[in-house]
Image: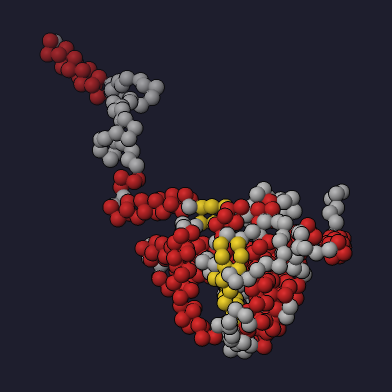
Amino acid sequence: MFTNALTSLSRRSLISRVVKPSLPPSRTFHSSRQLSAVRYVRFGGGGSDKGGWRPRFNQWDRPTKLLAGAVGGGGVYYVYHLERIEETGRWRFIDVSPEREKQLAEESNKEVLAEFGSKILPHNHPEARQVSKVASRILSAANLGEVKGHRGEETLSLGISDLFGNDVWGSPSYGSQAADRLKQEWEVFVIKDDKIPNAFVTPGGKIFVFTGIFPACQNEDGLATVLGHEIAHQVVRHSAEKLSGMKVFGALVLLLEILGLDVGVSRLGLTLFMTLPNSRSMESEADQVGLRLMAQACYDPRESTKLWERMSQLEAQSSGAKWWNFGAKMSDVDFVSTHPANSKRIKALEQWIPSALSIRAGSSCGADMSSKYESFKDTSRTLAMQPRPRWDA
């Protein structure tokens, strides 16, 4: 009986172990994942690359750091040497001193005199005297000095400070620095060469005029347009600006070469999109300032447009050998030129002529009242032809 009971108990125990379901193991409830230990990393501090942030500059190699430093330093140097032209208000980069500019001009003068010395007309030659007369009148009116060996015929009332400082131009006291810097004794050289229609003025006060420009001038007002333009280049120091621009050009070519761009491509691109546009801007600026100078000396600024019309005709006659200019058809194209197209110059001059006539009417050129009255009528007639603003627009 005991055996049966034991056997029965063993069976019930075995059945209970087999039949009774097993419960899953219990676990602790968490509302979120357990956070691992957090390690604070100081901003910009040390530690491994995985644990902290590093500035990218520290990851640059030495050549890259040197290049970045050179570019940054060059940018600071460029900004430091920016200046505003007092005659027109334009900003430009210039780092060549007037003294250095004159030293370089002396070398250029020697080269020109060595090449054309045998063709220079004597100072008492009628053409040389005519050029000296017009140049002296312009320089005296702007208080920029006198022409060597030429006695001025009259005293003009306005100086260059008045010219650029009156209400007509809307900018205060422009030109005073130029008057102090350029007031000197100028010298005129007329070169007998009818095939070269050119004229230029160097920073040292040397005025060179080729007789080939006379057919386009035709009269004193036309010659005053040419001389006023060339003197204006020195008033605003375009020679120094070009020398400074050459440094920027060289630096940019070097930078683009380091970055992997072909030297030829970079030079071509910088020439087309930087050097030539800057040169055309300077030429337009000289047209504007030169128009004021000639008007102040009581020359007729309206002759300036006629001069460039005659220049266009002369260039059309002699442009057959130039591949970029197919006669007069391409006269409006100046993309690859250092000078603006003549048609564009004429349009710009037409916009500046009314103000120039006002300067001329206010100048004292030793003329009588009748000529002053005629100048006043010319100014009034020109201003009346200008379109009037619409105040209800």
Closer-to-camera residue (118/166): 118
Closer-to-camera residue (167/52): 167
Q: Quadrant of the N terminus?
A: top left
**Residue 362 falls in which quadrant of the image?**
bottom right
Left or right: residue 380 versus residue 206 is right
Q: Position of residue 351 (x, y in %)?
A: 75, 63
Left or right: residue 329 versus residue 366 is left
Say if 389 sits above or below 25 in the image. below
What is the residue that sits farthest to the top in this orientation?
2
Residue at image position (56%, 71%) is 187
Left or right: residue 374 versus residue 344 is right
Say if 284 sits above or below 6 in the image. below
- Residue 89 in view in this figure: no
Q: Position of residue 6 (x, y in %)?
A: 14, 13
**Residue 304 falls in which quadrant of the image?**
bottom right
Q: How is the image coloured?
A: secondary structure
Residue at image position (67%, 72%) is 133
Left or right: residue 328 versus residue 389 is left
- Residue 315 in view in this figure: yes
Residue at image position (47%, 49%) is 80
Q: What is the number of callouts on the image?
A: 0
Residue at image position (64%, 64%) is 139
Q: Position of residue 329 (x, y in %)?
A: 69, 82
Closer-to-camera residue (249/255): 249
Q: Position of residue 166 (x, y in %)?
A: 72, 51
**Residue 227 falls in which quadrant of the image?**
bottom right
